[in-house]
Image (spheres, helix red, strand yellow):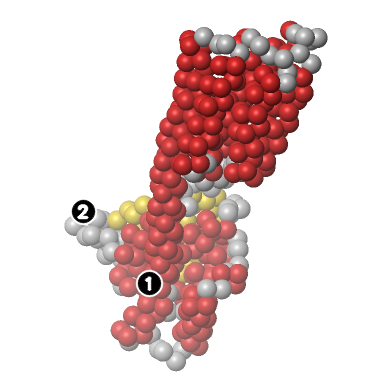
Amino acid sequence: MGSGLQRAQSFMILTTLLYRGSHLTVGVLAVAQRRSDLPLQYTGLAAALGMSALGYGAALRRGWFGRWHVWADVLVTGCVLPLVLVVWGGVREPALLGWAMLLGGSASAAAAIALERFEALAAVALLVVTHLLGYRLVGASPAVLGGHVNSLLSSAVMAWVMWWYLRRQGRLLDGANARALAAEAHRARYAERLEHHRALHDTVLATLTTLAAGGVDANAPEVRQRCAREAAYLRRLVQQTADEVHHREIGAALEEAVGSVEGLQLRVTAQYHDLPKVPPEVAAAFADAAREALNNVRRHAGTGHAYLTATRDTDGRGGAVVTVVDRGPGFDPERCVPGLGLRGSVRGRMAEVGGRATVDTAPGEGVRVELRWPR
């Protein structure tokens, strides 16, 4: 569709083309009614058709009027044609000259929107002079002359007002679109930063926090392997090599998340049953949310053991359900404010792909996190 200004230009080309088409139709009917009386009118009508095809054809191809095409139309169609019909064409009655004079109205409309201000005024002035001179030569009454001049001036003024309004609205629309695109780009950058923050929170920060607390042996092979994986992740994050991220099935994605947490000495009993195929982004969301839920078990449950179950949803929509359960002390959800991990890395990730995460807990009852897609 193009910009708002381009759409305004296309509309004005179409409007003035239809206006010229209505005038040419009048000319064709007028000449056809007097087939043998004034043969030069056929030549004049052909010239008007040719100039119209040249000017408006170029405008449609280029997206706007050419300055010289507009001037050629004003001079040839609006000024020369009526005078030639009077001087050499044998026209002596205002009624026989009307169709040629009528073309001046559409010529003035195109000039008003395509030419600079003083050029447009000069073109309209030439057309007015042509009307005054041509109708005086054929003895037209003041009423006929006044009506045609008024029509010519009104065509120019209305076309200019319409063009001014549409151009203004087009620019406003372009400005609004530019602001919307800038806001969308800002939201995209924010979402990207948020996703990176979540990933760092769930992986690198979780590992560093565990090592700093002294809860695991930093030299253990599984810990060293996890550190190596997360160092590779950091390198990809810095280099922005998104093509290195593979689209995994949900089972493989969950197993990788489980292995990542087990590297920090959390024992996970995992069971998978009849897992459905889900989009890659959904599989990634399940894995990332499950990893953070398991990290929460390791940090807060105090049991060193978690249970993960993944299965097909039984509602018939082809979805999946993943649960993470621990048998720790639990907590009162009305008194504990969810942290960044639960809000963003668990609930936020599932919500972004059209799923949901729910937490079922009570003091002394452990915690059950359910991840479900679709919602």
What residue is at 46 percent from the left and 33 percent from the top? 160
Q: Nearer the viewer, residue 109 or 83?
A: 83
Q: Nearer the viewer, residue 314 or 373?
A: 373
The residue that disc 1 covers is 201
- Residue 190: quarter of image: bottom left
**x%, y% of residue 27?**
68, 17
Q: For residue 356, say whether it is visible.
A: no
Quadrant where the C terminus is found in the figure: top left
Residue type, numbered disc 1: His
**x%, y% of residue 171?**
43, 45
Alpha-carbon span between mark 1 and mark 2? 24 Å
Outermost residue to the bottom: 219
In screen coordinates, is 367 left or right of 106?
Answer: left
Q: Residues within 10 Å of mark 2 (few under 14, many from 20)?
A: few
What residue is at 43 percent from the left and 32 percent from the top? 161
Q: Nearer the viewer, residue 251 or 138?
A: 138
Q: Residues within 10 Å of mark 1 (few under 14, many from 20)?
A: some
Quadrant where the N terminus is found in the figure: top right
Q: Is mark 1 in CB contact (under 8 Å) with mark 2?
A: no
Q: Is residue 61 above or below residue 365?
A: above
- Residue 57: quarter of image: top right
Residue type, numbered disc 2: Glu
What residue is at 58 percent from the left and 30 percent from the top? 107
Q: Is residue 72 above or below residue 243?
A: above
The residue that disc 2 covers is 334
Tell me which numbered mark, 1 or 2, is placed earlier along the sequence.
1
In screen coordinates, is 165 left or right of 104?
Answer: left
